[in-house]
Image (tube, grey):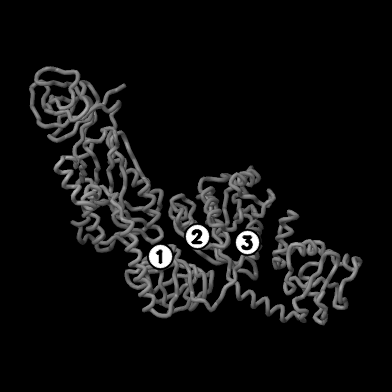
Amino acid sequence: MIKISPSSLKKFFMINEKKEFSFNSELTLDQIKKACDYFEIQDNLILPVIANKKTNGLKNSENTNRFDNISINTIESCFDKNNNSNVIACSNNISLKRNGGEDIDNKSIKNKNIEEKEKKRNIVVTFIGHINHGKTSLFDYICKTNERNKEHGLITQNIRAFKANLNDNSVCTFIDTPGHEAFIPIRQRGIQISDLSILVISADEGIQEQTIECIKLIKELNIKIIIAITKTDIPNVDVDRIINDLLYYDISTEMNGGEIQVVECSIYKEDSINKLLDAIYLESEFIDLSIKYNENAEGVVLDSYIGKNGIVSINLLQKGILKLNDNFYTGSSYGKIKVLKNYMNKNVKYAHPSDPVVIIGYNKNSIPIAGNKFHVVESETIAKEISEHNKDTILSSQINDFNYSMAILDKYKDMIINPEIKNKNDINGENNVETQLDNENGNIIEKNIEENENKLKDIYINYFIKCDKQGTIDILKNSILKLSKEDTIYRIRNKIIYANIGDISLSDINYALSFNAIIIGFNVKIAKNIKNGKSSKNNLSSQFIFSNVLYELIEQIENEMIKRLSKKPTGKYIGKAKILKIFNLSKFGKISGCIVINGTIKNNSNVRILRDGNVIYVGKIISLKVLKNERSQVNQNEECGIAFDNFTDFNTCDIIEAYEEN
């Protein structure tokens, strides 16, 4: 049998009788009878149903009926401490018994409740949902913060944690997560460390793409949820439609006979927020929040950054007591706690499980990774040894997982694996892969001479990333690497040559220049010595993209990719020629002497001319001759003279691509 407390009983009847929950609700004797069919009632919490201190037991239904509307509080206060009977109350199907028949007075009950409370941690609750559905607004209202107005672009881009009261006796740790699709890794970390998630759905928009992604994560991680439907103050919203739509995703709410609570919320209606807090408290009664204080402190890194006093990490403590001067490690990072701050950014000497804390004291060049566990150990020596072992393990894993997907390495892959292959291919003339680096634009172009000319060629743009927080690195990487732009000739892709946190230094600029990389600064600045004009020669040729809002940064990167695309002539690709020589004729001026590399070149066809992979002309052929004879068409391996419409600025080695309109 499951042991149950008064608040849990209230939820039991709220679900089964579809009544609205309230902390002031009363349980009738009939309800308690019903509960006994399902649960073993803890006598120290519910205690007996006794009319007054003169009554030693209830033996008939006549006496029982007098207590149909007695509240739990009344039941507890009416307990007769002089009653030695094991059977406290009995009527028909109900039999409430005390464990061992001991005398329990009010003082011992109170002390035991305090002891139980001290062995429980705060519940950790994460707000999740689609972008702009009201997660941060709820977070701000409950925690009395003003995070939304501090956000760049008014969207959440980081994970944050805070503590707030659920009621007079309970405290909760709230975690706010981003709703933008790019921040799925941060959202997943938030769900993984929580006991309960609040799935926030806007009443006016309903279920959206990221709502569905959140539901998938909830099911995958098996996390309890409450549905919070926000913006219900907006006229003509249809809450019932949202509740029914949730059934398509196997989310069965109380209104549809399930067990998931639904709360209609508006930050302009205090009662609705109180109902949400009541719902959270109710769920906490069904979650095992027990702790052991004799355990070594342990938790998870939410994020990290470089502050004025060195490396800083934001953490959620999950086990044990964390104290100043504790030695710790996390992944390949380690240190000794020199500064410990709480969620209000105030210095503290220790922290308890479920507390969000800020830690300063990491070893130099030891930046922790968001999502890693941190552990307290006996000494700094142990912490250092474990972190170095982890570093070696990570390095070995990276070497084992290393692949040859980069364009330049592709050229040498076979030779690295088996040097004899390269020699054989060279002798047989089969090594036809050519990789070209455009030094001017930092583009890597992959092409194969024998490939079908209609196959797209990949151009890679190099990027060097510096951002404010470690947890943002993967977000930026994933967002940038998945971008792709293409036309009839090229597919533009991105490569990350380096990514780290902190302001942009002179060495960063020099490193980026060596790779012809564009420098991205996300929520960071350029070092002061560069700003003041020092080493200006080093940064004049550098290209920078600065932003503090993710979607604005992505727009700038997409624009950069579009610049690399060729201009698209109309028609179907039919052939390619290469300019070998330039002639000056009185009638046409400059004429290009060409050889047709593949396909055919037709008179009056649309063309574009490329130099080093960049389009320099899009237009039309106005004259096509072989020797002195005008031709309608020239085939592969034939030489010819070509004149273009209003264009003579071509050079030898330029490539001509011809297109025929349908």
Q: Return the mark for residue 630.
A: none
Q: Position of residue 336 (x, y in %)?
A: 40, 77
Q: In which quarter of the image is the N terminus?
A: bottom right
Q: Which residue is drawn at 61% across and 76% down?
A: 118
Mark pair 2, 3: CA separation: 17 Å
The circle on residue 280 is 3
List x then y, in percent, for residue 151: 45, 56
Mark 2 surroundings: few (<14), some (14-19) or many (≥20) residues within 10 A: many
Of mark 2 and mark 3, the one earlier in the sequence is 2
Amino acid type at circle 1 is Ser
Q: Earlier in the sequence, mark 1 or mark 2?
A: 2
Q: Report the residue marked by disc 2.
A: 190
Q: In this view, does 529 lie to the left or right of 361?
A: left
First along the sequence among labels 1 and 3: 3
> What is the distance, in whole Å, between disc 1 and disc 3 at their CAs?
29 Å
Q: What residue type is labelled 2?
A: Gly
Whether tag 2 and tag 3 are in contact, CB under 8 A, the answer is no
Helix, strand or loop at disc 1? Answer: strand
Above or below 292: residue 215: above
Q: Residue at x 66, y 45 (%)?
A: 240
Corner quadrant of residue 638: top left
Q: How far across and down, in percent of the image, does residue 28 sit?
A: 81, 63
Where is mark 1, residue-wise?
A: 304
Q: Label 3 crowding class (10 Å Cα cut-off): few <14, some 14-19, many 20+?
A: many
Amino acid type shown at disc 3: Ile
- Residue visible at 26% across and 33% down in the picture: 452
Judging depth in this view, the residue of 579 and 156 nearest the camera is 579
Label 1 vs label 2, nearer the camera: 2
Q: Relative to the observer, which residue lies in front, 136 or 406?
A: 406
Query: Which picture quadrant has residue 484?
Result: top left
